[in-house]
Amino acid sequence: MQDIIDECDKMNETKLIGTFFKPRQKAIARYATEAESLQEKVLHRLVSKAAHTEWGKEHHYSAIKNYQDFQREVPVQTYEEIKGYVDRMRHGEKNVLWPGQVVWYAKSSGTTNDKSKFIPVSKEGLQNLHYAGGRDAVALYLQQNPNSRIFSGRTLILGGSHAPNYNLKHSLVGDLSAILIENINPLVNLIRVPEKKIALLSDFEEKMEKIARVAMDKDITNISGVPSWMLAVIKRVMELKGTDNLAEVWPNLEVFFHGGVAFTPYREQYKQIIRSNKMHYMETYNASEGFFGLQNDPTDPAMMLMIDYGVFYEFLPMDEFDSPNPHIIPLTDVELNKNYAMLISTTCGLWRYMIGDTVKFTSKNPYKFIITGRTKHFINAFGEELMVDNAEQGLARACKATGAQVAEYTAAPVFMDAEAKCRHQWLIEFAVMPDSLEKFAEVLDTSLQEINSDYEAKRYKNITLQPLEIVVARPKLFHDWLKDKGKLGGQHKVPRLSNNREYIEEMLCLNH
């Protein structure tokens, strides 16, 4: 009888807290019918707020009345164009790209090369971009799962680390996740695992061990983080507990809020180690530059674009990416099933900033999309225009056909071998080997042709491209490569596709 009472208390606890999310659930419902007006309000608010900054004065923000004015006055930006402004802000200058002084900077490589980007994170950005996304993830999850008991236990949040910024007082740079943990509402710390001093450790292997030991005896109901790094922590927890089923360690675990990398390569691994019929997965699109999307339907992999935060969206058609005058459009002009590079203007002082991600919309009421890749992470060495989204779909089919599980992968072109043959080379670390590597390669190659007509054309009769090649990576190859780069943990990720052989050659040298 007491067990029944305890269960009811847990459910009621979540239902009580859940009432605080109902206003947001109603507001999000307006996305389906009021997208244009919501985005217009965001643009007006951004321009008005920044009118008296250095950037705002340079680009005549006080005279901007509508989107056409904004588009005419403000040029498209990459990090290289704003780098000088950001560096001055990091040295303490005020009112440069955003009003006041910005003291937090999210360190992001964007790729895994040595050059870092430092993305400003203003106080407004923290609240109406990043924390707003976390709040709405819970709001949408509770709406989908009215019998949730998410607040009856603890939340395991995986994050990175931070460091001083130019020795400037109170100013720090680091992984976005570390910035969020550092500034989080103290009430959240009551239910969060691990404590801040462990969460912000810079050595990922030390941090993983400490988190695993702290978390393994807690009642974890939800986990948040990057799938690859969370998997490492979970596996260590199970090792310490002597089990191959996480549900035996955390019987009340019900949801994984994941983002940072595509979930497709990890989905089967998570299903194998979390054998619970009450487990849910929600994808989030949160980056150093902002929080942009949430999965609002567990049966649909597309995410809903969050359109009433402090971000105004624009889109550049990928078929015009190299054009000197591409036709950039606002949200309401996008076409379905077309690849776009995404541009953002935000309350962190980014203006018409090309974030580097490519997206494809699947719905307009509300606007829903999938991330198809990166503007720099694709293979188009022979006109095949292979995107990350194509790769993920192809690998999923190959895994299904051969019983394989992919842990990590990267791919690059082989421009011409000794026999003057060109092909794609895939370096794959398997969590479970396929029953036949030849069959895996054949299914992957065939699938890519079915998914991508440009790839199919180049593979026609092996004239331009030969069948793809798969090189099996040794265990922990990608872990060791990231470690060599000083990029373990946090939001660092493996480049999936590359148009040159820089990354894959470095990895092949370690593959022994």
Image (cartoon, rainbow, N blue to C red):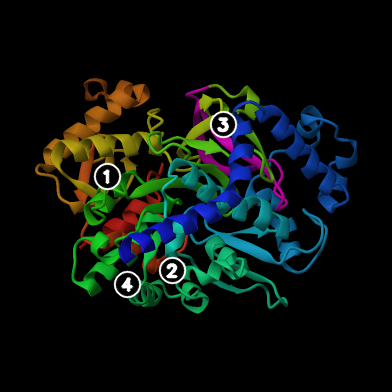
**Relative horizontal placement of residue 161, taking residue 94 as reference (left or right):** left
Judge whether residue 217 is colored magenta.
Answer: no
Q: Which residue is under mark 4? A: 216
Q: CA distance from mark 4 to mark 1?
A: 36 Å
Q: Type of residue at label 4?
A: Met
**Which residue in the protein does label 3 denote?**
321
Numbered disc 3: secondary structure = loop
**How far from the left and from the top, in percent, is residue 378?**
42, 39
**Could you tell me the amino acid type at mark 1?**
Trp
Q: Position of residue 122 (x, y in %)?
A: 71, 59
In the image, the segment drawn in magenta is: 336-362
**Between residues 269 and 184, which one lies in front from this camera angle?**
184
Q: Earlier in the sequence, mark 1 or mark 2?
A: 1
Identify whether 485 is placed above or below 353. below
The circle drawn on residue 486 is 2
The kind of residue on which mark 2 rests is: Gly
Furthest residue to the front? 1
Q: Which mark sits nearer the N-terminus, 4 or 1? A: 4
